[in-house]
Amino acid sequence: MEWNFQTAEELVAALRAGAVTSVELTDEAIACIECDDEVINAICVPDFDRARANAHRADQARARGEDGPLLGVPVTVKESYNIAGLPTTWGMPPHRNYMPAEDAVQVSRLKAAGAVILGKTNVPLGLQDIESFNEVYGTTNNPWDHGRTSGGSSGGSAAALAAGFGALSIGSDIAGSLRTPAHFCGVYAHKPTLGLAAIRGMVPPPEPALPADLDLAVVGPMARTARDLTLLLDVMAGPDPLTLGVAYELTLPPARHEQLRDFRVLVLDEHPLIPTGSAVRTGVNRMAEALASGGARVERHSPLLPDLTEAATLYMQLLISGSVARFPIESHEQLRTRAAGLSADDQSLDAVRRRAMVFSHRDWIEANNRRELHRHGWRQLFAEFDAVVCPITPTPAFPHDHNRNPLERRIDVDGVGYPYFDQLVWAGLATMPGLPATAIPAGRSPEGLPVGVQLIGPMFEDRTPLRLAELLEQKTGGFQAPK
């Protein structure tokens, strides 16, 4: 039997039943990578010798009667996570030889659950692109079309899953970095509620792995099914044992509903700042139809929805001001000069980004206060709805564009060009207030490319969008392997 495209849940069941060994699963996964990854380039740091040794130990543990939620299951890890004995570069050439001394907390949790780590997956330079390419490891191609991006910054993980390289992967998300690659590659991902999963050890080299949270940023699971997302989230979720974990234990509430007919869903397919491409709009509508046919209450408009333009503006302000906080003072002065030259009438997202590059602490506090008003607005909305279905980006995966200045790139939406980073407004809808969001496949474009949508849920009610994802998967078919 071929195992590479089986779900993690199926692999766990087969391992427990004695139908296969971890060594067999690991050998088959490695053979698949060695055969197919030359043209995809998803696995940038293989760790095959240790994987085989760990698989052997997993089989020995099972023979002794031991078990674990992922015991013996082959998985991959985004390159940006520290793994002792492997380089962590974030695609930055000056750090190509940096070796962390200890595992990231999420890597430790994977190992404690019994997972077998095959290696690390590719990322963009500094994790700051919707392409996964860098001078250290090269370019990751989309398994559906090698001339297109697999997404970023968890693009290597999404490509690996689509190609059958391991049953699960862990990534991170601050600008759609879990959801966009899942959308582009036809797999599943879950952006947890902000703060739900500890991020220590997912840190740029050579910074110390401190238990400090980064605004907007989360770590989360990627898989080929919704149920596998839940399986992996249960391994990842929980506070850092060095901080909140000293006093708190996690208890996630159950999903609000178990049947599709009980869900109340708001469906969005239009944004005031960038159009939605026809292929993505079709995917959103396909999910809306599946919801309605399953008896869910589906609405297209609500006065409770926070203002999308202000939400996008706040997201860009918080994202960009945080991203440039460590720029050298010379660059800061240049950025200040450019921002001062903008017209006061220019309220475009590009102008918002340029002004945010020179935000003062007072500016950030004001933006954060407005964010809290948006969070309160979402609480009110989720008193009337259980989830929001909307795009992840306006288009399917686009052709590779390696212009080193992303501010000069354009994103083509049905033949019209828009500033490259404007496509982040949909990802930011959940990221800015810190809401959970599950990315699910929603069909194919006319060119045969995967199209996904996201299911946004109430804060810390991650099981609600995950359960809705599972129900929609049952109706629409979910993941399909690239042809």
Image (tube, helix red, strand yellow):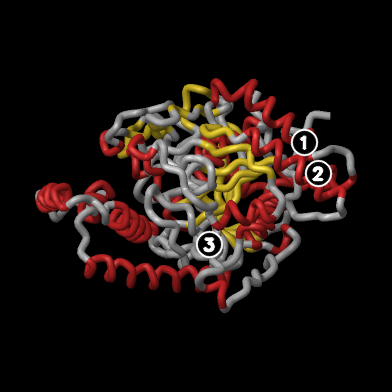
Name the image quarter holding the N terminus: top right
Residue 118 x/y as whole percent:
63, 37
| x and y, in percent, of residue 128 in the image | 37, 43
- Image marks 3 and 1: residues in contact by CB distance under 8 Å: no
Q: Quadrant of residue 40?
A: top right
Marker disc for residue 198:
3
Q: Residues within 10 Å of mark 1 (few under 14, many from 20)?
A: many
Residue 328 sits above or below residue 434 on the image = above
Camera-side residue of 165 and 318: 165
Q: Decide: few, some or many residues near mark 3? Use Cα within 10 Å; few <14, some 14-19, many ≥20.
A: many
* Residue 267 visible in the shown view: no
The Cα atoms of the two marked residues, 1 and 2, are separated by: 7 Å
Q: Counting residues from the N terminus, which is met first, the one under dot 1 or under dot 2?
A: 1
**Amino acid type of the residue tagged 2 in the rendering:** Asp
Sequence-earlier tag: 3 or 1: 1
Residue picked out by circle 2: 59
* Label 2 crowd bin: few (<14), some (14–19), many (20+), radius 10 Å: many
Look at discs 2 and 3 and give the one toward the viewer. Answer: 2
Residue at position x 41%, y 31% in the image: 136
Secondary-structure class at tag 1 = helix
Question: Does 339 sit left or right of 166 as displayed?
Answer: left
| Amino acid marked by disc 3 | Ala
**Contact, CB < 8 Å: mark 1 with mark 2?**
yes
Q: Position of residue 335 (x, y in %)?
A: 16, 49
Q: Is residue 469 left or right of residue 180?
A: right
* 385, 456: nearer the viewer: 456
Using the numbered discs, state the Cα–Cα distance from disc 2 to disc 3 in whole angstroms: 29 Å
- Helix, strand or loop for disc 3: loop
Residue type at mark 1 is: Val
Is 58 left, or right, of 45 in this rendering? right
Residue 100, numbered label: none
Q: Which mark is residue 23?
A: 1
